[in-house]
Each structure stands twice: as C-alpha cells, then as structure tokens.
DNA sequence: AAAGTGACAATTA
DNA sequence: CTAATTGCCACTT
C-alpha cells in the first residue's frame, strides 16, 4: 500500500450513495490532479469490496470499467439513481 | 532496477 | 460533431 492508493481508497469510500466522482476529481482530492491515470489503475488492481469503486466514472460521462464487469457497474449506477 | 500496462484526459485532425 | 493521437501517473512483472 502506498500513500497514493491509501488516499484513493479513503476518498472513494467517502463517496455518498447516489453521488459519483470522475477519475480526475478523485485524483485532485488525492492531491495529484495529474494522477487520474493512476487512480483507475489502483482501483483496477485492488478490487476492495469496502470501496464503492463503481461510484467513479470517466470525465466524459462514460462508465469506464469495473473489476467485476463494467456491465454491473452501469447497472449499480442506474439502481442508485445516478443519471448523467 | 527497468520496461510495460491500464477502469483516463485533453488536444488535434 | 466523432475518431485518433499523445501525455500522464502509479502499479505489476
């Protein structure tokens, strides 16, 4: 575990239900606005169930991916009432 | 230790 | 407007 990943986990886990953050936003909150690339990488390698990684989407408004299947991610977002 | 990978983003054509 | 290219970071091998 590195400081960066730790920050990412902390922030993502703090995302309230019904809300979503973009990878860029998360990167900014971690303190590295240019590490949006790494944010996705962290969430991808570490599929922690304590962390709602499905609340993180692309800045383009696209779903992006999901360690359990991007299909499920999209489903969850719709279930939680998030609409782009 | 060095090179490669990826759930991205912004720019250019 | 959409499609393709380049740059970036941290992690994995």
Image (cartoon, coloured by chain):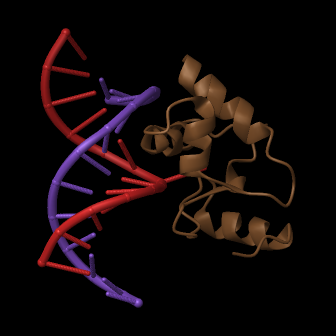
Chain colours: A brown, B red, C purple
**Residue A15 placed where, x, y %?**
79, 46
Residue in view at x 71 percent, y 41 percent: A12
Residue in view at x 75 percent, y 47 percent: A52
A37 shown above or below B2:
below
A44 sits left or right of C12 in the view: right
A12 shown above or below A59:
above
Q: Of residues C10 and A31, which is closer to you in this image? A: A31
Location of residue C10 (image quadrant): top left
Residue A35 visible:
yes
Q: Quadrant of the N terminus of chain A?
A: top right
Residue in view at x 59 percent, y 35 percent: A46
Location of residue C13 (image quadrant): top left
**Residue B4 placed where, x, y %?**
20, 40
Q: Quadrant of the C terminus of chain A?
A: bottom right
A20 sits left or right of A35 in the view: right
Location of residue A76 (image quadrant): bottom right
Residue A49 visible:
no
- How many numbered marks appear? 0
Residue in view at x 63 percent, y 55 percent: A68
**Residue B6 placed where, x, y %?**
40, 50
A4 shown above or below A33:
above
**Residue A38 placed where, x, y %?**
45, 38
């Amino acid at each position: 575990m590195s400081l960066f990943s730790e920050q990412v986990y902390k922030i993502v886990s703090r995302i309230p239900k019904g809300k979503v953050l973009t990878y860029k936003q998360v990167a900014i909150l971690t303190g590295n606005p240019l590490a949006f690339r790494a944010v996705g990488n962290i969430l991808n390698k570490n599929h922690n169930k304590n962390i709602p990684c499905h609340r993180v989407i692309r800045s383009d408004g696209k779903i992006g991916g999901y360690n359990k299947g991007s299909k499920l991610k999209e489903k969850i977002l719709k279930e939680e009432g998030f609409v782009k």
